[in-house]
Image: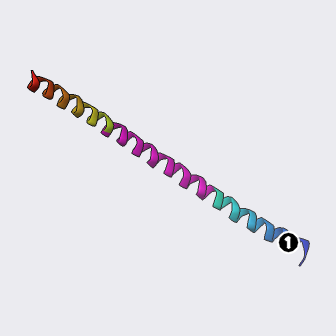
Amino acid sequence: MTIDERLERLTGRHEALTQSVELMAIENRERDRRQAEIMEGLASLVHVAEIHEHRIERLEREQDA
């Protein structure tokens, strides 16, 4: 195998690795975005649960009075 052939082969491998890293970076960004959306949704649900909990406590206090 000549030096030119080796360099060509290494160049091909480098390009393939670069593409793989780029795809992984895109996938990681997408995963991070989805996780952020999930966390926002969970925070909203916690807020709604807290509101309902306070409402129930208030109704129970009114009922006991």
Q: Quadrant of residue 57?
A: top left
Residue 54, image x and y in percent?
A: 23, 28
Q: Residue at x 62, y 56 (%)?
A: 22
Residue 64, image x and y in percent?
A: 10, 25
| Residue furthest bottom in the image | 1
Q: Quadrant of residue 63?
A: top left
Colour treatment of the image:
rainbow
Picture quarter with the N terminus = bottom right
Q: Residue at x 41, y 42 (%)?
A: 39
Q: How many marks?
A: 1
Q: Residue at x 87, y 71 (%)?
A: 4
- Magenta span: 22-45
Residue type at mark 1?
A: Arg
36 and 12: which one is in front?
36
> Which residue is denoted by mark 1 in the rendering?
6
Q: Residue at x 45, y 43 (%)?
A: 36
56 relative to 35, above or below: above
Residue 25, image x and y in percent?
A: 60, 52
Q: Is residue 33 magenta?
A: yes
Q: Residues within 10 Å of mark 1 (few under 14, many from 20)?
A: few
34 vs 26, left or right, is left
Magenta: predominant secondary structure element?
A: helix
Q: Is residue 13 magenta?
A: no
Residue 61, image x and y in percent?
A: 15, 24
44 relative to 6, above or below: above
52 and 32: which one is in front?
52
33 vs 52, left or right, is right
7 relative to 53, above or below: below
Picture quarter with the C terminus = top left
Q: Quadrant of residue 40?
A: top left
